[in-house]
Amino acid sequence: MRAPKGFVLSGVRAGLRKKRGLDVAMIVAEEGADAAAVFTKNRFQAAPVVLSRRALQKSKGRVTGVVVNAGCANAITGKEGMAAAKSVGKRAAELLRCPEEQIFLASTGVIGVVLPDVKVRSVLPKAVTSLSALGLDAACRAILTTDVGPKVAQASFTANGSKGRVVGFAKGAGMIHPNMATMLAFVMTDVAATPAYLKAALTKAAGVSFNAISVDGDTSTNDTVLVMASGKLGNERLSEPGDGAAFQQALSDVCRALARMIVRDGEGATRLMCLDVVGAKTERDAKLAAHAIATSPLVKTALAGGDPNWGRILAAAGRSGARLATKKVSLTIGSLTLVKDGQPVDYEEADAARIFAKEEVPVVVDLGVGKASASLITCDLGHGYVSVNADYRS
């Protein structure tokens, strides 16, 4: 897949991972790009998160180059980790002949280990000479950790009569929960848009995608989603919130697709639960219930076993802090109602088991007290998740 106009990418190996494979990716906006990002809300923020946030502020939303490494999160590493990240940014700026504040950094991997910056800096010249509009595949593979495979999505839109593209790629399989996750995502587009517009558009898109998924309830120190606009489409620059409805839709579609791939690739996951909480007093209540259900080990292990044990679902909703009417609550899986007005209804257990045995299980919980709702996609929790994370550093 080609990158949108104005972007080139590459992926190289620096030897950061124990297993062979690419582990450093580079994205370059050939003439610079307007950009915006959203980051983890974890209080322990990795050095690249701190530096990239500052860089975006200092450059007023301009990015020329992005350097991403796998194999080392460079999080909770103090001054030494910060210095290592800065040295990578400085070298990248020298090679790309741009200000240091136009270099964006991201890392993923083991927390508490200082980035081996010498290794990264040594392969940056190769990353630069390898840059290509067709370098997306290599860049995608270079950022993976426990992922089964690359995650890429694209969408088209029309602005001022011209057809534009949004292309994104991501990594993430574990430590995934709303308010971002152990995930990195990079979205490129040829549209012309101000950094302020992009920030609002990305925040909206993340709200219905990356912040509406959960694998295990953990939120990482490194979560980053970056959107970059090269302006090569030549459209009138998007600047106001009401501008570019078609672009907003395309951006949201790409983010949703990537988010869904992340949950489907959840470490050891075999099936998804597509959860809708409706009938809530407020959106906050709906989200409280949805998050409690999606992160309940009992719900997730029942899902792993294909067991329609709906009592676990309602028990999680009941302890979530969300307001609900116990005598009005209902629960439906697929087209089958299991609970209505707070009471179990007659249904065939075999029918419920067939629905829970599918790769995607739709669940609707009605709290019975209002009109607000929230949606969230989660996955099951089985032996595979334990195996991956028990052996992750070995």
Image (cartoon, rainbow, N blue to C red):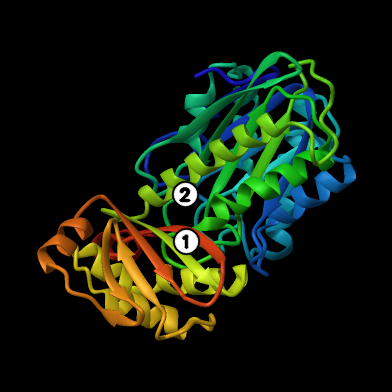
Q: Residue at x 66, y 19 (%)?
A: 164
Q: Which residue is mark 2?
A: 172
Q: Position of residue 33 (x, y in %)?
A: 78, 28
Placement of 351 over or under 233, stated as above or below: below
The image's mark for residue 112 is none
Tell me what residue is drawn at x 80 percent, y 39 percent. Answer: 197
Provide the secondary structure element on which disc 2 rests.
loop
Disc 1 marks a residue whose amino acid type is Met
- Image quadrant holding the C terminus, namely bottom left
Disc 1 packing (10 Å; few <14; some 14–19; many ≥20): many
Determine whether, in the image, residue 382 is placed left or right of residue 317.
left
Residue 344 visible? The answer is yes
Along the viewing direction, whichever of 79 and 174 lies nearer the viewer: 174
Q: Nearer the viewer, residue 137 or 14?
A: 137
Where residue 118 appears, as percent x and y from the top left, is: 63, 42
Identify the image quadrant of residue 328.
Answer: bottom left
**Secondary structure state at the residue bearing disc 1:** loop
Q: Which amino acid, by three-letter code, is at mark 2?
A: Gly
Q: Position of residue 109 (x, y in %)?
A: 50, 53
Q: Is residue 297 left or right of residue 351?
A: right
Residue 122 visible, this orientation: no
Q: Are marks 2 and 1 in contact (CB under 8 Å)?
A: yes
Residue designated by label 1:
175
So how many labels did they put on this image?
2
Q: Position of residue 171 (x, y in %)?
A: 49, 44
**Relative vertical location of residue 351 with respect to residue 93 in this rendering, above or below:** below
- Residue 69, located in which quarter of the rendered image? top right
Q: CA distance from mark 2 to mark 1?
A: 8 Å
Q: Residues within 10 Å of mark 2 (few under 14, many from 20)?
A: many
